[in-house]
Amino acid sequence: MKKLIGLALLTTTLFGDSPAESITEPVDAPVSPDQAPIEEESSDHGYGSFALTEFKMGYLRFGDRKLRHHYNKGVLDIQLTSSICFWKPLYAYLGVEYIGCDGRLHPGHQKIQLRMVPVSLGVQYIQPITFDLKYYLTAGARYFFAHQWTPSKSLTRNGVGGFANTGFLYYLNPNVVFDFFGEYSYKKLHFQKMGGSLQVGGLILGAAIGYFW
């Protein structure tokens, strides 16, 4: 009996599994999409927002009925503007324009020409709607320099008026933007041949291409 017990103990010692702690490496549990960490996105998404330069073209409709009557073939307005952020969402706005139109005096149908170079200085408010679409509103002062030619004489007039414009900026890529805008300006200048003081500003509708730094 003792021999059998001794043999059993020997067999257990030689062939039995010795107790050992099983070491299990931790396995990451699957994370559901709802529990996945959300990366914080910047408000500008890398899109330009500090300075904007634009080349604008539009159609001007004079605010004065007499000017619309004499210059009835359409008036082209060309602008070069720049906006620089000084305190978000406010920008300092500077613009230079060229306006040229040909017409005729009535009665007599004498040829006349009008050329104007308005210079604008104002404040622009730009508000993001989505990461690639922004809305803006601008207001300020506009200096009008105008020169008119008639068959008998030429006149030069100038003075300070005001303007306001609004529109939408759509990013074609992180820096290039397309702008559709509307604008209204006001200033009366005196043209004796055309009946006294006339409102040389008016409504402009147009589009622009710009670069946002």
Image (spheres, rainbow, N blue to C red):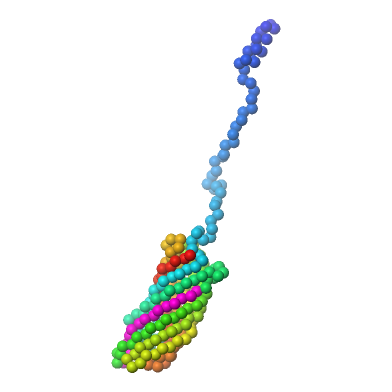
Magenta region, residue range: 93-107
Taking the magenta stretch, the answer to whether it contains residue 174 is no
**In this image, 85 relative to 60: left or right?**
right
Taking the magenta stretch, the answer to whether it contains residue 97 is yes
Task: Examine the rendered structure and indicate whether residue 15 appears above or below residue 43.
Answer: above
Q: How many numbered tags mark residues here?
A: 0
Can residue 195 be spotted in the picture?
Answer: no
Task: Examine the rendered structure and indicate whether residue 85 appears above or below residue 62.
Answer: above
Please report the residue visible at 62 percent of the width from the left and 28 percent of the height from the top.
22
Give coordinates of residue 171: x percent, y percent: 44, 63
Of residues 175 and 9, the one nearer the viewer is 175
Picture quarter with the N terminus:
top right
**In this image, 149 relative to 95: left or right?**
left
Magenta-colored segment: predominant secondary structure: strand
Give coordinates of residue 50: x percent, y percent: 51, 66
Give coordinates of residue 101: x percent, y percent: 35, 82
